[in-house]
Amino acid sequence: MMPHLRAALAIIPALLPVVLHAQGAGSMEERNRAFLRAAGEREVERIASFFPRDGEFTWIGTVDEGHGRRTPARWRLRRSDVVPAFRTRGPLCESFADAFLGGAPGLTRELYEHEAPWRRVSATRFVPRRLDARSPYFVEWRREGGSWVIASFGDMRYHEMPGTPGFGELDIIPAVPGRAAPEANGYAADARWFRENLVIRFLGLSYIKDALPRALAPERVRRVGTLGNVPVFAGATMRDERPEIILVPERPGEYQPYRAGDAWPCRW
């Protein structure tokens, strides 16, 4: 064997641990653990660094409706959506909120309650160790350039999913005493903003769906504004200029409550 070849082969055993360590530092398993640590510590910029720079990723938020009924909602987001989506009124806020402060059963709650390492259930998918491969809590990865980035992740809620970032917030036109209100005789069930659970705004406050629709007699509500062709109401006895609860008629005689954002349980 040629001397220089023999010398080169001799240093391979010494280099092998270094090469393996470098590979491990960027492995999917280590990226998954690092992401879960960042999520548990709620460091938004660090969390954002795990999402793709190019293209989109998917968030699957499952609503647990009780009695064994679970409804998944799928959202396509870009990295530029991440930080706004994590803010107090953002759709991903409850996924990463402080589980002790907010009580939100999102991804962070799962981290707090089950600290055992997540397990790999497919080529690119991880779930909490105690759950099976169909878990609504999961993180799935894909390659981008030379590193692993999140292709999709999922968690679960016990109420309606919030609106998608990027659509913005829809402003209600307030009713003005002494001035005729815009004609509005539609119902929210026919409106895209209602079906997609978008955030709506009234006099500077943001509102999101809260609880289930309720039947109310006409004398129990008063009109406070208009959104598109849908009238917006508050309780007849509520005289606050900016009420905590507003009511949107979903269909004749049934009103969907919306709660002001400052009353949401999600916070950082």
Image (cartoon, grey):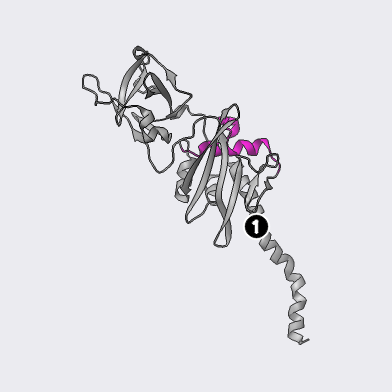
Tag 1, which secondary structure?
Answer: loop
Residue, x 74% and y 73% (percent of image)?
12
Q: Quadrant of residue 19?
A: bottom right
Picture coordinates of residue 119 (x, y %)? Answer: 69, 47
Magenta residues, start to end: 90-116
Query: Residue at (47%, 42%) from the top-left corner?
Result: 85
Figure check: 144 above or below 240: below
Please tell me in which quadrant of the rendered image residue 10 appears. Answer: bottom right
Residue 47: x, y in percent? 55, 47
Position in image of residue 50 (x %, y %): 55, 51
Question: Disc 1 marks which amino acid?
Answer: Ser
Q: Is residue 253 above or below residue 13?
A: above
Question: Where does label 1 land, which residue?
Answer: 27
Q: From the viewer's side, name the closer residue of 100 and 23.
A: 23
Q: Label 1: how many residues lie within 10 Å, few (<14), some (14-19) or many (20+)?
A: few
Position of 97 with respect to 224 (left or right) is right
| Left or right position of 233 against 126 | left
Total marks placed:
1
Residue 244 seen: no
Residue 169 vs 209, above or below: the answer is below
Seen in the picture, residue 117 relative to 19 is either above or below; the reply is above
Residue 236, by quadrant, is: top left
**What residue do we see at 60% from left, 47% from top?**
139
Q: Is the N terminus in the top left, top right, bottom left or bottom right quadrant?
A: bottom right
Residue 100 visible in the shown view: yes
Q: Is residue 3 magenta?
A: no
> Residue 104 at what x, y percent from top left?
56, 32
Left or right of residue 1, residue 175 in this image:
left
Q: Residue furthest bottom?
A: 2
